[in-house]
């Protein structure tokens, strides 16, 4: 291990172990408190249990902080932690990662709650866990098979083949009216079906942005989400997909849409304005369809050149939807501004303060929060509390009043 550990004395008050800030792997859960040395001595920076995120790395880089400290009593824990991180980074070879990325592209994540033990399905079901995809239930369109309770308890993400999405859509359509469905489960299934149908519409529009029928269908689903949250704001917890083991574009888009709509309702926007906000938030990442898959699916940190290409997804998204007559002009603000920051440190236009529209401010918070709480193959997710703490530390980047409403809205998520 390349980390040199030595003891430094901070004015005789406390002994610390210094280490390089860039040795902390993104996505790691810190097993100790981390401090930074300031003019007045040591100051606490990250508490034990914090997930070290890309946002945290960017913060340290922006502040010019290259060295961090832990208590000298944690020196052995620090050494073991950095050694494990080094070993973990070489856990998968390049071929394994490429195979995983390819397999992931061939599959589509579905909601575990949509599958009920004993019900028949005519599409095969698979489990994605870490870098492996394995079969849980093998069937054909002509020969449905009943779901066994045991397969639903497996840890990982439930996925199907993308070619079976039409069969899954039919399955959802018949689920709510099924005589085999217990009455107590019907309201839950209605919410699950709304989530899943919204995800599939997002995929449809990512595949064909000019489909007017699909865009109208998406607007109808947004209206239903608004109606659900207007009647019962706590349904937001059911509408969010919070238990993923890896990042999926359509699930992320759904979550950002639901969170943005929730904030729109909380601040008293008119339904018409919330619908426009919802459209922009649902499709905020549509520009990623123009970004090379090897960049989107890269396991690890993007280099500077790759990141410059990645950032283009914002302007590409606006280009894709700009000429579509069914997309309100106001919805484009959420797409074009969801990476802007009030300090002017965002992209693509480095907008400041009032230059950023309300929909851009809302979507920026929702996008950042969901990104922080979503795990990836090499990155643990932050807890909701930790994610909100990280965003709050960057309060100059985000609208403080909107952030207060956002935090209140998610008060019960743990």
Image: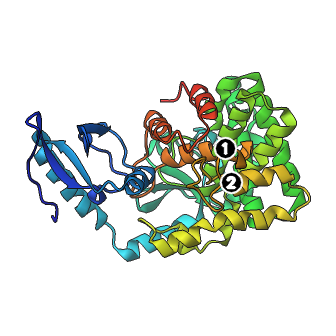
The x, y position of residue 104, in whole percent, is 53, 64
Circle 2 — which element? helix
Residue at x-position 73% and y-position 34%: 264
Residue 230 placement, left or right of 302:
right
The quarter of the picture where residue 266 lies is top right
The quarter of the picture where residue 256 lies is top right
**Image quarter in which the N terminus is found:** bottom left
Taking the image as drawn, is residue 396 in sight?
Answer: yes
Residue at x-position 47% and y-position 72%: 304
Mark 1 or mark 2, which has the lower sequence index?
2
Which numbered disc covers residue 361? 1
Residue at x-position 44% and y-position 71%: 303
The x, y position of residue 223, in whole percent, is 83, 38
Residue 250, placed above or below residue 29: below
The x, y position of residue 288, in whole percent, is 64, 65
Residue 388, placed above or below residue 184: below
Seen as rendered, the residue at the extreme front is 39
Cα–Cα gap, marks 1 and 2: 8 Å
The x, y position of residue 60, in whole percent, is 37, 52
Q: Residue 236 versus residue 291: which sits nearer the camera?
A: 291
Q: Residue 371 versus residue 66: which sits nearer the camera?
A: 66
Which numbered disc covers residue 370? none
CB of mark 1 within 8 Å of CB of mark 2? yes
| Mark 2, residue position | 337
Q: Residue 55 versus residue 76: which sits nearer the camera?
A: 55
Circle 1 — which element? helix
Residue 266, placed above or below residue 329: above
């Amino acid at each position: 291990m390349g980390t040199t550990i030595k003891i430094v004395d901070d004015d005789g008050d406390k002994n610390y172990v210094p280490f390089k800030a860039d040795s902390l792997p993104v996505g790691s859960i810190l097993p100790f408190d981390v401090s930074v040395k300031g003019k007045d001595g040591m100051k606490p920076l990250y508490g034990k249990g914090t997930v070290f995120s890309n946002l945290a790395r960017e913060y340290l880089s922006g502040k010019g902080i290259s060295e961090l400290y832990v208590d000298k009593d944690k020196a052995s824990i620090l050494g073991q932690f950095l050694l494990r991180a080094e070993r973990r980074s070489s856990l998968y070879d390049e071929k394994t990662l490429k195979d995983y990325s390819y397999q992931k592209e061939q599959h589509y994540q579905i909601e575990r709650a949509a599958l009920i033990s004993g019900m028949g399905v005519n599409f095969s079901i698979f489990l994605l866990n870490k870098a492996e995809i394995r079969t849980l239930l093998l069937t054909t369109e002509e020969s449905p098979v009943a779901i066994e309770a045991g397969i639903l308890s497996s840890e990982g993400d439930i996925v199907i083949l993308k070619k079976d999405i039409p069969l899954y859509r039919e399955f959802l359509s018949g689920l709510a009216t099924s005589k085999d469905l217990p009455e107590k489960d019907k309201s839950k299934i209605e919410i699950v079906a709304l989530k899943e149908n919204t995800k599939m519409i997002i995929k449809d529009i990512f595949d064909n942005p000019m489909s007017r029928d699909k865009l109208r269908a998406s607007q109808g689903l947004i209206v239903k989400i608004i109606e659900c949250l207007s009647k019962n704001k706590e349904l937001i917890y059911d509408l969010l997909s919070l238990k993923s083991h890896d990042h999926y574009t359509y699930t992320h888009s759904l979550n950002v849409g639901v969170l943005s709509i929730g904030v729109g309702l909380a601040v008293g926007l008119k339904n018409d304005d919330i619908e426009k906000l919802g459209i922009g938030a649902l499709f905020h990442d549509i520009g990623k369809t123009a970004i090379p898959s090897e960049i989107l699916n890269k396991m690890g940190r993007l280099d500077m050149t790759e990141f410059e290409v990645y950032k283009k997804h914002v302007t590409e998204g606006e280009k894709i939807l700009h000429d579509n007559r069914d997309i309100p002009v106001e919805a484009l603000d959420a797409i074009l501004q969801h990476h802007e920051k009030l300090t002017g440190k965002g992209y693509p236009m480095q907008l400041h303060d009032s230059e950023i529209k309300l929909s851009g401010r809302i979507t920026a918070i929702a996008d950042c929060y969901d990104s922080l709480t979503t795990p990836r193959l090499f990155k643990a997710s932050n807890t909701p509390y930790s994610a909100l703490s990280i965003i709050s530390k960057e309060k100059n980047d985000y609208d403080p009043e909107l952030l207060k409403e956002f935090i209140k809205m998610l008060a019960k998520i743990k």
